[in-house]
Image: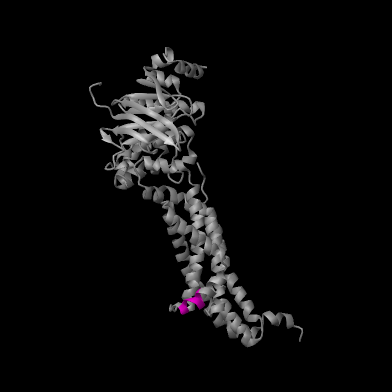
Amino acid sequence: MTAQPPILEIQGLRKSFHHVEVLRGIDLAVLPQELVFIIGPSGSGKSTLLRCCNRLEEPSGGSIRVGGVDIMAPSTDINAMRRRIGMVFQSFNLYPHMTALGNVSLALIKVLRKKRAEAERIALAALDRVGLSDKARSYPADLSGGQQQRVAIARALALEPKLMLFDEPTSALDPELVGSVLNVMRELKRGGMTMLVVSHEMRFARDAADRVIFMDHGAIVEEGSPEQIFVKPTEARTRAFVAELVR
Amino acid sequence: MHQFGFFDAFFKWQLIERYFPAIMKGMAVTIEIAFAVVLTGILLGLLLAIARSFRVRPVSALIVLFADMFRALPPLVLVLLVYFGLPNAGIYLPSFAVLWLVLSLVLAAFCEEIFWAGILSIAKGQWEAARSTGLSFLSTLTYVVLPQALRLTVPPITNRTIAITKNTALGTVIGVGEILNQATTAQSFSGNATPLMMGAIAYVVLFIPVVAFGRFLETRFAWRRA
């Protein structure tokens, strides 16, 4: 696996919002089929890092390559890149005026130019993967939070992304609904999806993550196996943060 | 004055018979102008709101200037200004066209602000979700943002449209043969208010269905939010 080139390669990434430096030179490579977990206190820049990876935030400096393509290059079609980079948001962001099927098939029709029938077949298959093919005709308002998030995952999945970004996917969910979303993520991992996940679900991180990254003040403080970060972190800041998480 | 004086002052049968065709003609003109104004006003307002959503500074500034001007000025002032002013500049427009143009611009100014507020009210997450799947700015606006924004704007757009189309009555001061113009002409010939009452009834007959339709749209487009 290590011989393969990374799917995501970030070098010297910087991001400032009005003179406030949120990311101070991030270097990170994610290999194919790897699940990398990012933890850190709020304001540490982890969501910004994730959002730079598909340029929802415009980086201030550094480089980001996805599948070998520099996504910051002026010649790069960012819309074409984005459909290969799935993103799942904390607040689901489903389109409330469309059914689950409509949510998943929109980009298939409008971006990939597929015929409606074929788009819906693909969308149904994606909904099936997240266990919601029976909710295809439901509107977001009729779905639980966990179901909405799974539809959002299906929406990204239907475009067959090379990489999936998860921005605190379970933080807005009631505790009893978290499991269903994590199970879908486990399935994706088993299917070989490359994933970059910002989350504080420690138990999930320990049994699914290949690597855990601890960020603070816009920089990577420490990275290693889940075991290393959660059980025997070397940095004092990591220790303090993990201790808070466990409590 | 006989015992039916008050009744005859507003509902004199001979006059109703005599002026019925004129009032009907006025109604037809009012309907024509109203339809034309609604169509161009709402469409232009929507186009301006879309243009503003690209957030190109000078373009937005011009749109805001236009919207504020036409919302601030009384429509009657605009009607008179355009009707008496343009010929001096060598542009001759029939009074019908002047009324249509002015009311369309006024309606567009209000609609632009309403549509713009609707577009702004759609959560940033909707834009981000759509863009993250590769949808372009324009596709996101067209398929994700506008369908939601337009539903929210149905009630205020309906109210504003009714308010502006009622201003077709201003056409009377520049001789557009709409309802009020026919009614006042008939009133001055007959010396009786019956034609004015007929005009009032014509407006009610015309606008009550529009108001009812607006209410129908409000309920039809109200949908549960996630």
Q: Is residue B124 magenta?
A: no
Residue B124 shown left or right of residue B219 in the figure: left
The front one of B59 and B163 is B59
Dominant secondary structure of the residues highlighted in magenta in the image: helix
Q: Is residue B83 magenta?
A: yes
Location of residue B156 by image quarter: bottom right
Location of residue A73 by image quarter: top left
For the magenta stretch, what is the residue range? Answer: B82-88
Rendered position, A115 above or below A63: below
Residue A226 shown left or right of residue B224 in the figure: left
Residue A108 shown left or right of residue B211 in the figure: left
Q: Which residue does the image show at 34% across and 39% down from the upper left?
A: A123
Rendered position, B200 above or below B136: below
Q: Is any atom of residue A107 visible in this view?
A: yes
Q: Position of residue A52 (x, y in %)?
A: 37, 35
Q: Is any atom of residue B209 visible in this view?
A: no
Q: Position of residue B183 (x, y in %)?
A: 59, 80
The front one of A42 and B183 is A42
The front one of B114 and A161 is B114
